[in-house]
Image: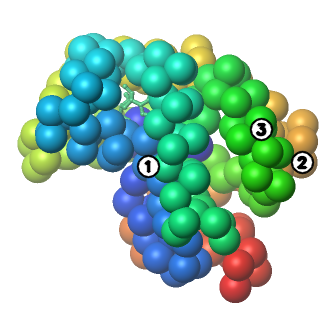
Amino acid sequence: MGPPGAGKGTQASRLAGRMGVPAVSTGDIFRANVASGTDLGRAAQGYMDAGEYVPDELTNAMVRDRLAQPDAADGFLLDGYPRTTAQVGELDDMLAAAGHALDVVVELVVDVEELVARLSQRSSEQGRSDDSEQVVRRRMQVYAEQTAPLVEVYSARGLLRRVDGMGEVDEVTDRLLAAVGTLHA
Ligand code: AMP
């Protein structure tokens, strides 16, 4: 977990690689669907470009399909899911049905000024359509309203680990590896 610009995508793929599990990034899957013009991509694009969340039903169905793939049978790292209370409930059901459970939930913590700086750099480097200043502002707001409360939910379950996301990419990866400890080692 973490607000836009916290480094979730970058760190998720590094961490997953080190742990030998697939990174399941809902944002990446949506962007791939938009790029290839699928029905899901067409349904999601307007929400993404406005900085809003894609509706839970679409998102949950997509994650359910992805987690049913054979490469996720022995574990996976979710990046950007769940983001709403309804998604938490849906994920609980998916995991229970498969006889799995979450091992740990990581919150990447980064200063607001640093988030803004990273997103403006990404905007010029990658040209992501939702990194414009106005849309970023909305994404931050949506995160604060809908996703930040999930920190408490997972903290109450004893699953949450907060990790400092400031500094060099390698340093943050090391902190994350330390935070997830010996999981799947
Ligand atoms: P991200 O790459 O994680 O920042 O996601 C980019 C965009 O994809 C978000 O701003 C949402 O529009 C959409 N998205 C990604 N994950 C979710 C999710 N779990 N629920 C709803 N929308 C999502």
Cα distance, mark 2 to mark 1?
Answer: 23 Å
In the picture, measured across the screen, residue 157 lies left or right of residue 121, that is right
Q: Residue at x 13, y 47 (%)?
A: 126
Is 59 on the left-hand or right-hand side of 108?
A: left
Q: Residues within 10 Å of mark 3 (few under 14, many from 20)?
A: some
The colouring scheme, among rainbow, by chain, secondary structure or one colour, is rainbow
Check the image and report above or below for 113 versus 19: above
**Which badge, 3 or 2, is on the more N-terminal residue?**
3
Q: Quadrant of the N terminus?
A: top right
Please tell me which residue is depicted at 58% across the width and 15% down the height of the picture.
145
Q: Secondary structure at mark 3?
A: helix
* 74 relative to 27, above or below: below
Viewer can see residue 33 = yes
Residue for badge 2: 158
- Disc 2 crowd, CA 10 A, few/some/many (<14, 14-19, 20+): few
Instruction: Return the mark for residue 180.
Output: none
